[in-house]
Amino acid sequence: MDIPSIEERNGKDWFVTIPMAIITTKDVLITVCLEETPILTAFMDGRVRDFHTFMKTRFILQILYKNATQYLQYLRIIDKKSEVIENKLHQSQKNEELIELLELQKSLVYFTTSLRSNEVVLEKLLRIDKNPEDTDLLEDVIVENKQAMEMTSIYNGILSGTMDTFASVISNNLNIVMKFLATVTIVMSIPTMVASFYGMNVRASGMPFAEHPYGFGIVLFFTLVLTLIVAYIFNKKDLF
């Protein structure tokens, strides 16, 4: 079966799934996994009641039940993490938060695939003859597994909608910023163009106010007025 696990990348915890095998022999029950998992440590620490290793079938079902509840616990953590990231997105114009949401969505994809695989295993176990108590426990495991699948599907849909929405918002914000910068550049270039024109090597007789004693101030005044008029027009057209 597949179990949920936490993987650390770039100083942050992300959720993945890894396989775990349960092997039964005549005398013992063996579990094989790539790393330690809270699913088994819960039994070793005595946090799971009424389990007995000699009751192998029931013990396996209790492990499966703990695995299903572990998925639900991690799904609630993913939901809380997504809410925190969404709150950051309201005040952000960067893609970092969107990348974090993408990582959470990848975790949900892992969960969906693994939960479906586990469902196949549980359906096979359902067809095996067992005592009524074990059958009831297996049905509880199936219910928990289905609930985890439904929650995964719901959260995945919410994250997809959130990512699409905020991606559009960030794109629009960047477009507004670029438009604002372009407009400011145009407005601020007016004094520069006027000053450059008067600074050219042209005949003074052909330049307005070139020979006037206050010509520089007059030109500066008209340049300022022209700049304010252009800025007012751009503001009316929502270009600022």
Image: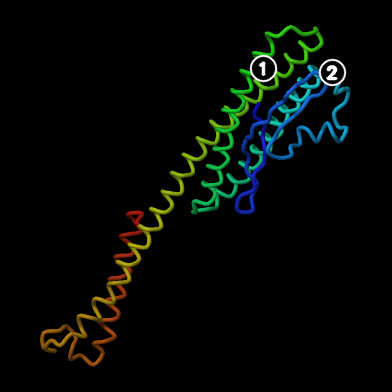
Q: Could you tell whether 27 is left or right of 232 in the image?
A: right
Labels 1 & 2 near each other (Cβ < 8 A)? no
**Which residue is at a point 11% across and 84% down the rendered structure image?**
206
Q: Measured from the top left, where is residue 191 in percent x and y?
A: 29, 76
**Which residue is at a point 69% across and 17% down the rendered structure image?**
142
Q: Could you tell whether 103 is left or right of 125 in the image?
A: left
Residue where numbered disc 2 is placed: 55
- Return the residue nearer the eye: 33 or 182: 33
- Spatial distance from mark 1 to mark 2, Cα to Cα? 18 Å
Q: Quadrant of the C terminus?
A: bottom left
Q: Quadrant of residue 46?
A: top right
Residue 122 is tagged as: 1
10 Å crowding of disc 2: few (<14), some (14-19), many (20+) = few
- Return the residue nearer the eye: 159 or 60: 60
- Disc 1 is placed on an element classified as helix
Q: Quadrant of residue 129?
A: top right
Looking at numbered disc 2 in the image, what kind of residue is underneath it? Met
Q: Measured from the top left, where is residue 126 in percent x and y?
A: 69, 11
Q: In the rendered view, would you say 158 is above or below 205?
A: above
Q: In the rendered view, would you say 153 is above or below 55?
A: below
Q: Quadrant of the N terminus?
A: top right
Q: Measured from the top left, where is residue 60 in percent x and y?
A: 76, 21
- Disc 2 is placed on an element classified as loop
Q: Which of the two labelled residues, at mark 1 and mark 2, occupies the earlier sequence position? A: 2
Q: Measured from the top left, where is residue 81 in percent x and y?
A: 64, 43
Looking at numbered disc 1 in the image, what kind of residue is underneath it? Leu
- Return the residue nearer the eye: 167 or 25: 25
Name of the residue lying farthest toward the front: 26
